[in-house]
Image: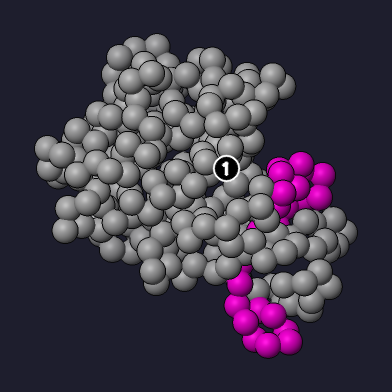
Amino acid sequence: MEPGTAWARGAPIGAGAFGTVSLPMNRSNGGLFAVKSTVSSIPSSQNEYDILRSLDSPFIIRCLGRDQSVENGMGMDNLFMEYMPGGSIVDLLDKFGRQLDESVIRAYTRGILGGIHYLHRQGIVHCDIKGKNVLVGANGVKLGDFGFAKRIVDEGENMDVDERYKVRGTPLWMAPEVLNRVLQGPASDIWSLGCTVVEMAPGRPPFRNVSNPLVAMYRIACTEILPEFPLSLPPQGQDFLDKCFRRDLSQRWISAQLLDYPFLNQG
């Protein structure tokens, strides 16, 4: 999509952290894509565009361009992205019975981890890995919604000073060091990956049995309590989660280690 291309907005198909997502059509050729629209004054739109246009991976949603529009008297930033017909993993769980087969969980986890590994090698932290931000297509899954994403200074975990203490993401998927405002780096994405695997297995969010989100956040930040490991996962799957949920950052596995873990390579 080039700036100025005529397009017609279709029905809403979802919502991101800062805007709504709809399914428009390119008026010149009938092609379908996705557009995320946010109020122009929200800086996340520019941040997401700047990050997405620099990425090229089969595990990351493709950015097709952007433009601005005025709708109902309000300026809007429109970010064009490839259309993923399956929606998010959360949408898929709603459609197919709230629980995915183990082989599907392994395949989706490989795709999510492939995206995380690519991002970390590019010096980027996603900051909001969860089922709602993992999109499903005919050939697997891709990471989407980069409104919270940020760059890091180097390949390690030393964040820019201005960003170090900013908390980004969704609380129940956040790592302890994020909720404690210590650090949000690559290891934090790995904790969120573990939460997303937990989300896929029973089809419910992590800490689903805790009625008060503030209590769950306290447990994550200030106790040794972990999200409940799904009993439906085999021993190797449980051990995979253990590697993601190490509270000691030096002991939490990195993406390259997890990609080689046997649980993801069965079958």
Q: Nearer the viewer, residue 185 or 5?
A: 185
Horizontal and vertical percent position of residue 5: 79, 76
Seen at 32% across and 36% down, the residue is 257
Horizontal and vertical percent position of residue 161: 69, 19
As shown in the figure, which amino acid type bears the numbered disc 1? Gln
Q: Quadrant of the C terminus?
A: bottom left
Estimate how packed mark 1 is, as few (under 14), some (14 to 19) or many (20 or more) residues with alpha carbons within 10 Å.
some
47 drawn magenta: yes
Q: Quadrant of the N terminus?
A: bottom right
Image height check: is 96 above or below 115? below
Image height check: is 195 above or below 140? above
Seen at 29% across and 56% down, the residue is 107
Q: Is residue 53 left or right of residue 267?
A: right
Seen at 33% across and 64% down, the residue is 95
Seen at 81% across and 69% down, the residue is 3
Q: Nearer the viewer, residue 263 or 218?
A: 263
- Name the residue at the bottom extreme: 29
Q: Residue under circle 1? A: 122
Horizontal and vertical percent position of residue 21: 61, 60
224 drawn magenta: no
Whether residue 210 is visible to the viewer of this picture, yes or no, is no
Q: Quadrant of residue 7?
A: bottom right
Q: Is residue 49 left or right of residue 232?
A: right
Image height check: is 136 above or below 243? below
In magenta, the rendered stretch is 25-50
Judging from the image, what secondary structure is the residue with disc 1 in? loop
- Name the residue at the top extreme: 222
Horizontal and vertical percent position of residue 61: 54, 59
Q: Quadrant of residue 22?
A: bottom right
